[in-house]
Amino acid sequence: MNNIGRELKNHRTEIIMSHLLRAGVVISAAVAFLGGVIYLSRHGFEPINYKIFQRVPVDLCSVKGIWGSVLSFHGRGLIQLGLLLLIATPVARVFFSLITFVRQRDIIYTTVTAIVLAILAHSLLGK
């Protein structure tokens, strides 16, 4: 492939990645905003006791619990889902980069990107 073709392919890849990042941020913000609106409409006028710390409910500390809360249309669950989507956005970019480097047969970048993806997966899924 000549240089012009390679540059066009790289430019298309950059455009796709920018759309991926933009869509991830916009979708996560919209989901979190919707969750905030629902949460405030249901709990916005409840009195707050600042003397007692109340942690996030245990069911919102796992993906399964968050999904159950989202399906029940609870505001906190939607906010948590928005945060998960925001975290997943750069991970999706790294995954997309890995696929791109594999298709280009670039061994060095493929190896480095695979290591970065493995570290991200371990930090997100591992304990």
Image (cartoon, rainbow, N blue to C red):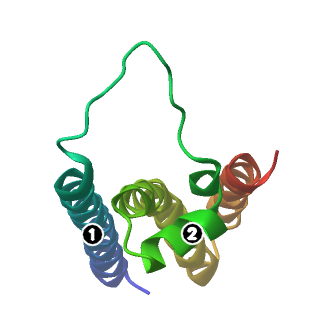
Direction from residue 7 to residue 111 in the image, left or right: right
Residue located at (59% from left, 69% from top) = 98
Side of 121 relative to 92 (left or right): right
Q: Residue at x 27, y 55 (%)?
A: 39
Q: Closest to the observer: 47 or 109?
A: 47
The quarter of the picture where residue 106 lies is bottom right
Q: Nearer the viewer, mark 1 or mark 2?
A: 1
Secondary structure beneath label 1? helix
Q: Is residue 97 visible?
A: no
Q: Residue at x 44, y 72 (%)?
A: 70
Rendered residue at 70%/57% (across/down): 121
Disc 1: CA contacts within 10 A as few (<14), some (14-19) or many (>=20): some
Which residue is at the front of the view, 86 or 34?
34
Front residue of this view, candidates 10 and 74: 74
The kind of residue on which mark 1 rests is Ile
For label 2, the residue is: 95
Q: Which comes before the other along the chain, label 1 or label 2? A: 1
**Which residue position is annotated with label 1?**
27
